[in-house]
Amino acid sequence: MEADKSRTPAGSGIEAQPQLLRALGMWQATAIVVGIMIGSAIFIVPAEITREVGSARAALCVWVVGGLLSLFGGLSFAELAAMMPQAGGQYVYLREAYGPLVSFLCGWMFFLIQQSGGIATLAVGFAKFLAAVHPFTVWQQKAAAMAAVLALTGINYRGVRQGGWVQTVFTGLNAATIVTLVVLGFVLGRPSPHPAVSLPQPSGLAFLSAFGVAMVASFWAYEGWNNVTFAAGEVRRPERTLPMSLIVGISFVVVVYVLLNLVYYRVLTASEVANSPRVAADAAARILGVPGSRLVSIAVIIAVLGSTNGSILAGARVYYAMAKDGLFFRWCAAVHPRFHTPHLSLVVQGVWSAILVLLAGYEALFTFTVFAAWIFYALTAYAVIVLRRKRPELPRPYKVAAYPLVPVGFVLAAAWFVTNTLIEKPWEAGVGCLIVAAGVPVYWLWRR
């Protein structure tokens, strides 16, 4: 089995250690893309999007635009992933394009709250939906969430093959359930019998601002497509597999999300969608009655577990790459001699995520990083242009289509989104900036 050949700095004392194995094929890589993207958000956030823009048509436009931007980002990342198929993915691309400080700040944000907080948030969501099936106390829910994090960490500790196999199973079950709901929605779904209630519909500049705010929820639902690049060092034939998994996976999710929203608006009015805390469950109940609501609960549990597993598998590879650069705990660069996994990085991530499960209010901090994450997405997409000029000699098995329109379009759209968030949600944007800025002194301490 081919080993990851990402660099190890001289004098680190880990040169003789076993290497990561390239054990993930096309199906597993695509399952990581799809499984991480389809979490609980698509079953909930359509309500927030509809409230912001005021109509079903405008809400569908939000989903389409968010999906196209995600695809543009995926196409840009695909060139970088095929060019530098190393563990750490996005962290590596930022390092090569802008230097270690920028890449460290991205990795710092991933570890401190975005990736670890995302794992914790998903685990808590799993426990809450599980409590809907069988009542649990608050502390029992927290225990169930922590158990899910530690169990999935244990599976990925045992090997990337095991983690990839679990990811494929969860993603397959989740996709089958959602496709079933979509088909039944179009075949059996009937328009809502309740009269439509008009929603406030902004116009002009107010509509553009509302559209930008709605995009935050859309991006949350589409979040995670970049994670497969983190595990690039364990993907077979990465020059082909990584671009294909990004393109196929993101395209599939965009189509599924749009169709699922069409089902929502087919059986519910826009006002019912806007006022529903569990849109998918209400729509399924309208189509199939009580069994429909149970079907959605099962779908959400499967989706959340799949997204959690994929996030655990991918995230640990970023801290492994940081440790190899001397910008994280050095021992996190170790590879297990038997399982060939970054086992200590997985353990650190699992413990920190479990701690976040216990902390109150971290979900709010996690939403703050959506703003900061898109700054790094924009920088990574622009790295395609930077590296074509800075490192023209590097082989590029895949080149982004319609260059430079795709990466430039993604960067401009991300700049608009970031600017709009600064104007409309200055508090959230400010906290996101502070989280990233707090990493600067930490970076210099680690460098010393």
Image (cartoon, grey):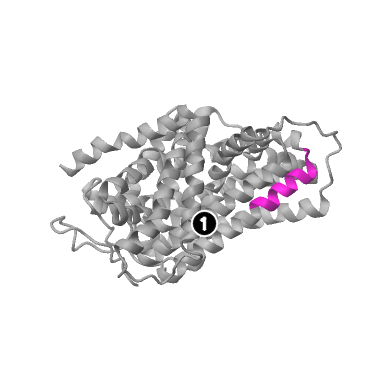
Position of 269 relative to 426 (above/below): below
Q: Residue at x 39, y 59 (%)?
A: 384
Visible in this render: residue 159?
A: no
Percent x, y for residue 436? 35, 37
Q: Residue at x 50, y 53 (%)?
A: 409
Location of the N terminus (image quadrant): bottom left
Which contiguous range is marked in magenta?
257-269
Position of 287 relative to 16 (above/below): above
Q: Amino acid at mark 1?
A: Phe
Q: Residue at x 62, y 32 (%)?
A: 206
Total numbered badges shown on the rendered structure? 1
Position of 168 relative to 275 (above/below): below
- Is 210 inside the magenta-drawn segment? no
Visible in this render: residue 273?
A: yes
Decide if residue 173 is on the left or right side of residue 274: left
The residue where tag 1 is placed is 72
